[in-house]
Image (tube, rainbow, N blue to C red):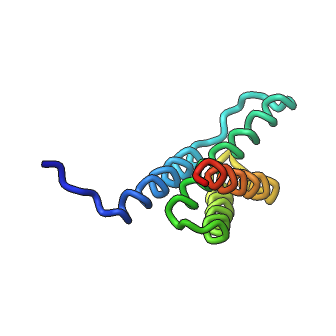
Amino acid sequence: MIPRVPRVVSLWLPVVAWAALIFLLSSFEAPDVGSGGVDYVVRKLAHLTEYALLGALLVRATRRELPAFLLGVAYAASDEVHQHFVPGRHATPVDVAIDAVGVALGVALYRRVRV
């Protein structure tokens, strides 16, 4: 018989795991892949995507849009502070804004699919 996982664990473990992965990826020095416009767009789309998934996981765990959004944006801001101390990385308000858009998209898409 397989033991039942408590609901709180099944809701929050994916959030914690995804946030840990974001933190881990932010801990590496930024790769020098070029400074062209395409590279910039790809990196910003990656920000948007990773935070959209975080937003979806947060609204799944909290069951409420506003707390999910605020938690996601707070995490994005804390991740930018973390990146400030990583060699080769920069903390920018623009990235927090892009991450916030990603969180909002994730929350909205999760709600749209689940309703």
Identified at 74% across, 39% down, the residue is 45
**Where, quadrant-wise, is the C terminus in this rendering?**
bottom right
Q: Nearer the viewer, residue 25 or 100?
A: 100
Position in image of residue 71 (x %, y %): 61, 67
In the visual, does 104 lie left or right of 21? right
| Residue at screen point 43% across, 59% down | 11
What is the x, y in percent for residue 55?
Answer: 62, 56
The image quadrant that residue 103 belongs to is bottom right
Q: Position of residue 96 (x, y in %)?
A: 74, 58
Query: Percent x, y for residue 7?
Result: 35, 63
Query: Could you tell me which residue is drawn at 49 percent across and 56 percent down?
Result: 15
Relative to the observer, which residue lies in front, 1 or 57? 1
Residue 83, quarter of picture: bottom right
Count of numbered marks: 0
Residue furthest toward the right?
Answer: 37
Residue at far left of view: 1
